[in-house]
Structure formats: C-alpha cells, structure tokens
Amino acid sequence: MPSLIWPSKHLPDPQPASLIKDSIIFPGGRGYPNAAPASRLIMGDNLPVMAALLPKLEGKINLIYADPPFFTNRKYPARIGRGEDSRKPDEWALAEGYRDSWPTLDAYLEFLYQRLALMHRLLTPNGTLYLHLDWHADSYARVLLDEIFGADHLLNEIVWTYHGPSPIRRAFNRKHDVILAYVKSGDYIFNVDAVREPYNPSTVQTFKASPKAGFGKIPDLERGKVPEDWWYFPVVARLHNERTGYPTQKPESLLERIIRASSNENDLVADFFCGAGTAPIVAARLGRRFIACDITFRAAHTTRQRLCALPGDPFTFERDSSICLPYSDESKLKFEIKSDSIKVNPRGKLDYWEVDPAWDGKIFRSAAQAFRPVRSDEIPCEIKVKTGRRICVRSVNVEGDLFQAELSV
Ligand SMILES: C[S@@+](CC[C@H](N)C(=O)[O-])C[C@H]1O[C@@H](n2cnc3c(N)ncnc32)[C@H](O)[C@@H]1O
C-alpha cells in the first residue's frame, strides 16, 4: 500500500486540553431546563480538544464533517458590523477571520494527519467522516485517509460545484471543492431515502412518453433519484439570508445533504473546524446532537449567535483553559431592570447580549439572548425575562470586545 511520507511525520500521544464551561445557553429565552445539555460548542485548538473528548467519546461520534484550512496560504478576513449589503458598501468593516498560512507543506500535512487520526478514533464503528478540501491538498489528504481508514473505506469522492466571479485568465476557473467521505467499517449509516431528489423534468417526460426508454430499467419517478457524487449548491453569496460575514462559510443545503445521509435523529454530529457553525446549525435543526469546535472567538461567537436564532435545544459553551475570554467590567452600557425585562442603552455597537436572571456567581446560564440580525442594525434593546435578585449580563460588541456585569435589584 503506497503511503505519504514527510520528515516530521509522527502521531504523538495527544495531550488533552482542560475544558472549562464558560456558560450554558438556553436559546430563545426558554428558561432553564432540568436535563444537562446534550450539545457542546468548544473554543480551542481541536487537537487538544479532541484528545480531551477521547476518554468519554472514543467510538461515540456518528458523523464528523471537517472543513479545515485548505493550504491556500492566504488570510481570510471576516466582514463585521452593519448588515453587509451591497447598497451600503461603506457600512461594514473587515476584522480578522482566520489564517490559512503554513511554513511548509510538511507542517500542513502534520497538522491534518494528527487531527484526522483522532477523528477516526472518535467515530462510531458505523460512523462517517466527510473531509472538505480543494485542489490545494485534496490528493495528499486522500492518501492520508487511505492510511488511517483503509483504502477500501472510501465511500465517495464528492465534487461540490458552484459558480462566481474569478480573476483567473490563464486557466479554467476553479469552481469546485472535493469532499472525501470515508466510513469506519462496511456497516455504515447511509439514509438513501432521506436524500433522494426529483428526476430531471426531461427524464420524467421521456419515461412518461415511453416506458422502454431505459432499456428495461424503469426509474421510480415518484420516489426520486439517488444524487450523483457531484453536487451543485450555490455558494453563500452577499445577499443570501444565511450569510454571516464569517469567511468561507459553507451553504446549509450542502450540510443538510451530508447530515441527512449519514446520521439519524439524536445522533452525535461533530465539526471540529466549525467556522460560522453551518454543520452544528443544520445538525440541531435536524434533531441531532452536536459538538462544534473552533480556535477563534469570532467563529465560536458567530456559531453561538446562529444557534440562538434557531432556537434549538440548550448547549454548553466551553473553552480550553489555556484560552482566556477577557470579559471587561467597564462599559458605557446602562441597564434598566424590571421584574419581567431588562433594557440596555446605548445599543449602537452591540452585536450580542445575554442575561442570566438568577446568577449563582459560578456558571453563567444564559436564559435569554438578543443579537444583531444579519441584515439590519436593529439589535433589540430589551430582553423579556423574569428577573431574580442577582442578575448577570454579558455582551459582545461588533469588534468582538467582551463585557460582563453583575446587577442587583
Ligand atoms: C474553512 S473554515 C470552516 C468554515 C465552516 N465550515 C463554515 O461553514 O462556516 C476553517 C475553520 O477552521 C478553524 N481552525 C483552524 N485551525 C483550527 C484548529 N487547530 N482548531 C480548531 N479550529 C481551527 C478556523 O478558525 C476556521 O474557522
């Protein structure tokens, strides 16, 4: 079996992160449930984070979607601020999103190899990994995955095609990504009926006109066809409602197909490079539990906001203890507390705020949230929530600055 070799190739014993619960989030102001949340959003480097999950979750994750940096050696800024609308181009700004910069190809391969090996350990015996890359590194990754999963465990090489503008004039426009799907064993989940799609109208027409058109094979026109291994979904463009401003955000429709095909309701779906959180959002909407992880606060924060907008089941927001979330207690914000609501002023630069109306001084339980809708500036200045004696409020402004204040009635 051929394999890929580079000088520093090795699989060290993974060093686990120590995970701290920053908060428990109950989206949509639904109050505190009794049961512990089944889903987790974790901020940290996914290598120590996955190592920390191994003791309890080895062989327990049904589906992993991985959309890592592609080895493009570029920086990807995020677009922040007021709704990014082409009619008001001056009203949004750029902020750091994430970097896809590597000193060498070896460094990138080492990064990927160690993480793919841990993902393999975390998958259930009937689990599937979807690794999303493009022409920069997909062929190297294919060889790495053959080594980790076994070459006969490649389920599909999926080509996701899209279109859009490109400055390329001396080659064909590069408008496809590659998604490598590997299963852990031959006994894997594949819900074919959940992803069937309608036949092309011309096919329907042809078979209605002549049942002999398929040389004896008559397709089930009602049930629809099994999708090919090349998919067309539009990229998340500027005026799409799902657009968050986080760079390289993937379309929900793409994740929906993957999650429906390769997991069942209540299964555990993980995305350790979650970015704007597309996979956890779709997983939650489809009734799956999720683990989402990203190394940047902007990604974790964007994911949290989208999860709050669903609103789905509660989830924990955790972080690697080596990463600090610098909550300041200094701000110009003023709060007005009533028995059934809290108001904030001024709301100008606020991106998100949340309330723990019965603060115990330990873990922040976010019972209700307000956030800036993607297309407007109007973050609500009032949160309806029954307030107790000790209240804690947290906020994030558009620049990503954090604030926390304890308020008493
Ligand atoms: C291609 S983006 C993911 C986009 C995402 N699928 C979406 O739909 O928005 C890659 C993400 O990986 C994150 N990342 C890079 N290195 C990481 C690491 N070591 N641990 C966790 N996340 C990492 C980046 O911060 C970035 O958000």
Image (cartoon, rainbow, N blue to C red):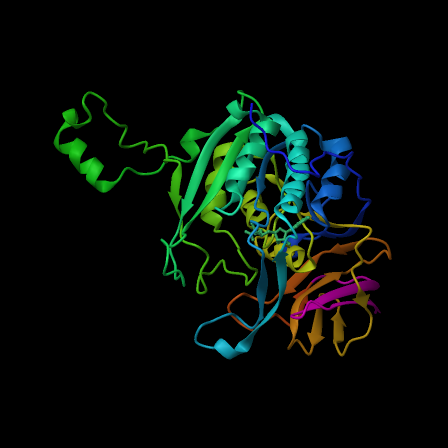
**Residue range (magenta):** 385-409
The spot of residue 125 in percent (x, y) is: 61, 24
Please check the rendered image and state whether residue 388 is part of the magenta-colored stretch, yes or no.
yes
* The image quarter in which residue 265 lies: top right
Q: Residue at x 58, y 64 (%)?
A: 78
Q: Which residue extends farthest right? A: 361
Q: Residue at x 61, y 46 (%)?
A: 105
- Magenta stretch, overall SS: strand
Q: Quadrant of the C terminus?
A: bottom right
Q: Quadrant of the N terminus?
A: top right
- Is 224 situated left or right of 396 in this image? left
The spot of residue 236 in percent (x, y) is: 46, 57
Q: Nearer the viewer, residue 78 or 380?
A: 78
* The image quarter in which residue 58 lies: top right
- Is 122 situated left or right of 223 in this image? right
The spot of residue 369 in percent (x, y) is: 67, 61
Position of residue 394 relative to residue 269, above or below, is: below
Q: How many marks?
A: 0
The spot of residue 355 in percent (x, y) is: 73, 62
Position of residue 224 relative to residue 233, above or below, is: above
Please check the rendered image and state whether residue 229 is part of the magenta-colored stretch, yes or no.
no
Q: Which residue extends farthest left? A: 209
